[in-house]
Amino acid sequence: MTQQSLEPQTVSEDAGEGTRVPAGRSWLDRYFHISRRGSTVPREVRGGVTTFMAMAYILLLNPLILSGKDVAGDTLDQKALITATAFAAALSTLLMGFVGKVPLALAAGLSVSGVLSSQVAPQMTWPQAMGMCVMYGVVIMLLVVTGLREMIMNAIPLALKHGITMGIGLFIALIGFYKAGFVHQGKATPVTLGPAGELAGWPVLLFAGTLLLIFMLQARNIPGAILVGIVSGTIVAAILNAAGVIDPRQWANGAPELHGSAVSMPDFSLMGHVEFGGWGKVGAMTVGMIVFTLVLAGFFDAMATIIGVGTEAKLADDKGRMPGLSKALFIDGAGGAIGGVAGGSGQTVFIESATGVGEGARTGLASVITGLFFAACLFFTPLTAIVPQEVASAALVVIGSMMLMNARHVDWADRATAIPVFLTVVVMPFTYSITAGVAAGVISYTAIKAAQGKAREIGAFMWGLTAIFLVYFALNPIESWMGVH
């Protein structure tokens, strides 16, 4: 018999009926149920650090995506945006650890940030855009409390859910290629390779090299491949820049140089810059579609990610039930509001949490460790700011490729499934609109099912969604007909 089997046993108040855990546990063990879930403090710490390393790239990518101008021509300060990104990730992840008590980490959702940058900011100011984030977060929390979230998840066909994820992946990849200068708007064609059919300058070649390096590291299952690739690309960029090989004017966001100290106080200037209202020129219909799109962008992956990581951690049963599921879903929704108030976009659960689970994490203590690392990053903004836009853009393309892996779950031989998924996937990047892609997929799915005589399989929710999206596509002709324009 092992030494552990000889230790006195007692039934804990937090354990399930018949579950026995070691007596004399520390308050840390009791609070996070570490022994009960078959883990140890060192495993949780190791898992929390691993998760942070796997998702630290968000501190670079989120400011990159939100670097555009709003309708008033204003841009967000990049250093303040890095602070907002780190703060929101830290707070959301700490809440998940202390309240949800599960090994799930949150940070700015790239799909949500993509919607804010491409669809929301061109129509309203950044404070109003962050107000949209708060609104979508509140909507998701209400859906969780009322039990409607799971009902809606079940109403939308699984294939369309995969199509939405894939479409967002292509959309994010397109942003990465464009931000890096690999793709340009052409004169004779919609897009070109580089500015004139060829790559121009060292920075874009560094992007290509960083992208290839990350793919190679992933192929060899190197932990933290994205972060390793970004750090390596930044070091090479700094060396080339210091050696005078690259003209500093070629860098999209300035030369990769450290100005002053590597440590600085956080810049919370974006905190609380949230506005509700003032949408007269946008219109109620557009505002409603924006909130709906943000809910969709942060909606589908979260539940699947939570259940998937929970299953990997052996916390969920075969029906997807796991301890703290409702709390985890609620905190994920709260992350949208937290990110909006912080000025750093809506927060959502990251699939990279699975890397920490792979290292043995089973409890919320791992999330607390990850959250503390994000909090520490608040004081290292100068180091984060030296990463070239071209290097960070490579990670966007990698994330896009990972999201496209959902294609393996689609039955491409079934045209009733394949066509809506195809339209969803291609319309998003081709129109630069996530809403348009979702609308195309929903309408085509309903139309094809009806044509097959399977209208009863569609469901009331999908019929209602189809009607809304039909109005969305026909809004301009309808307004013209009614004399609005």
Image (spheres, rainbow, N blue to C red):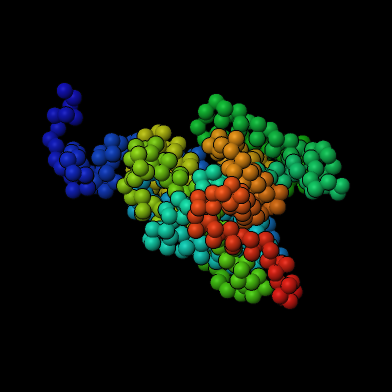
Q: Nearer the viewer, residue 431 or 484?
A: 484
- Picture quarter with the C terminus: bottom right
Q: Is residue 193 shown to the viewer in this render?
A: yes
Q: Quadrant of residue 215?
A: top right
Residue 376, position in %: x, y?
Answer: 47, 49
Q: Residue furthest right?
A: 188
Which residue corresponds to the image point at 25% horizontal and 38% vertical from the top-left?
35
In this view, 212 is above or below 157: above
Which residue corresponds to the image point at 42% horizontal and 40% vertical from the top-left?
309
- Picture quarter with the N terminus: top left
Q: Nearer the viewer, residue 427 or 389?
A: 427
Q: Is residue 435 left or right of residue 300?
A: right
In this view, 65 is above or below 355: below
Q: Nearer the viewer, residue 205 or 340?
A: 340
Q: Quadrant of residue 314?
A: top left
Residue 253, position in %: x, y?
Answer: 70, 50
Q: Is residue 106 shown to the viewer in this render?
A: no
User: How many dots with numbers?
Assistant: 0
Q: Is residue 327 left or right of residue 431?
A: left
Q: Residue furthest front?
A: 453
Residue 163, position in %: x, y?
Answer: 58, 45
Q: Is residue 66 left or right of residue 6?
A: right
Q: Nearer the viewer, residue 347 or 67?
A: 347
Which residue corresponds to the image point at 48% horizontal and 61% vertical from the top-left?
137
Residue 86, position in %: x, y?
Answer: 51, 52
